[in-house]
Amino acid sequence: MQTAVKRVERADAQRNRRKVLETADRLFGERGTAVSLGEIAAAAGVGAGTVYRHFPTKDALLATVLDHRLSQIAEYGERALGERDPDAAFFGYLRFVTGRALENRAICEALTARGDWIEPEKAGGRCVIDNPLAQLLRRAQEAGAVRSDLDPGDVRALMSGCTGIAGSASSREQAQRLAEIVWDGLRPQRNPESSNETSAVTETRNETAVTEGACPVCGTPVAHAGTGRPAKYCSPACRQKAFRDKRKGA
């Protein structure tokens, strides 16, 4: 009889622990690490004492919750280090980590944390992110896929900034698009000679456009309507600028 009772108690304890972990994972992900144990207990439908029996501190609970989330990042980092293409491995890792941070506030805080996260549980999360990052960055730089003047701290700061985009972006799609703009800035600059050639071609096209009915202010081709007087400027702004320039010269 006592054995059966103990089995029921153990099952109840495991069920309550699972409920606490699932609730904590959800609340930490939605609201960040500022959530209190009392709030987690209430949302899980258990007493505060039940939470404390399984997790004596919030850091202990947070460490358990983050362990699962960060293990996904660690596994991806290991796979990335095994990829043959340093370019794809490095930028794929950046996209994966920032994507997880945009989805989960606790991961976002782990990513943006600095020296104030001195607890071993939280510092461990930073190592999971930083260790693969440093190796992937070095490989990508050696392959010429990333600028040579960057160090892991620079990239980490940019990753942190990208997670902050979520707060001001109008949608997740916009946040991802803005992040891609940041990642493009990590690539080496284009060959200056190629840029000069492109500029020369552009200038030639603009000169040709002016002679073929282009705006005399900016060189943009002006669309002529089928009837009426042909437009001279491409927009009211260029018309006003031409008028101001004419007055200055008068």
Image (cartoon, helix red, strand yellow):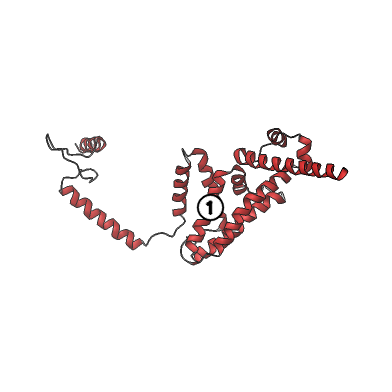
Point out residue 50 in the picture as x, y percentages from the top left corner. Answer: 77, 38
- The local secondary structure at tag 1 comes to helix
| The quarter of the displayed image where residue 76 is located | bottom right
Q: Residue at x 51, y 52 (%)?
A: 95
| The quarter of the displayed image where residue 18 is located | top right
| The quarter of the displayed image where residue 204 is located | bottom left
Name the residue at the front extreme: 1
Q: Is residue 229 above or below residue 140?
A: above
Q: Is residue 103 above or below residue 96?
A: above
Q: How many marks?
A: 1
Left or right: where 24 falls relative to 188: right
Left or right: where 228 falls relative to 241: left
Mark 1 is on which residue type? Phe
Q: Residue at x 48, y 66 (%)?
A: 143
Residue 147 in view, yes or no: no
The quadrant the N terminus occupies is top right
Point out residue 3 in the picture as x, y percentages from the top left corner. Answer: 86, 45
Point out residue 42 in the picture as x, y percentages from the top left corner. Answer: 70, 32
Q: Nearer the viewer, residue 178 or 173?
A: 173
Neighbour class for label 1 at 10 Å: few (<14), some, many (≥20)?
Answer: some
Residue 171 in view, yes or no: yes
Point out residue 134 in the picture as x, y percentages from the top left corner. Answer: 58, 60
The quadrant the C terminus occupies is top left
Name the residue at the right extreme: 2
Disc 1 target residue: 96
Q: Residue at x 77, y 41 (%)?
A: 12
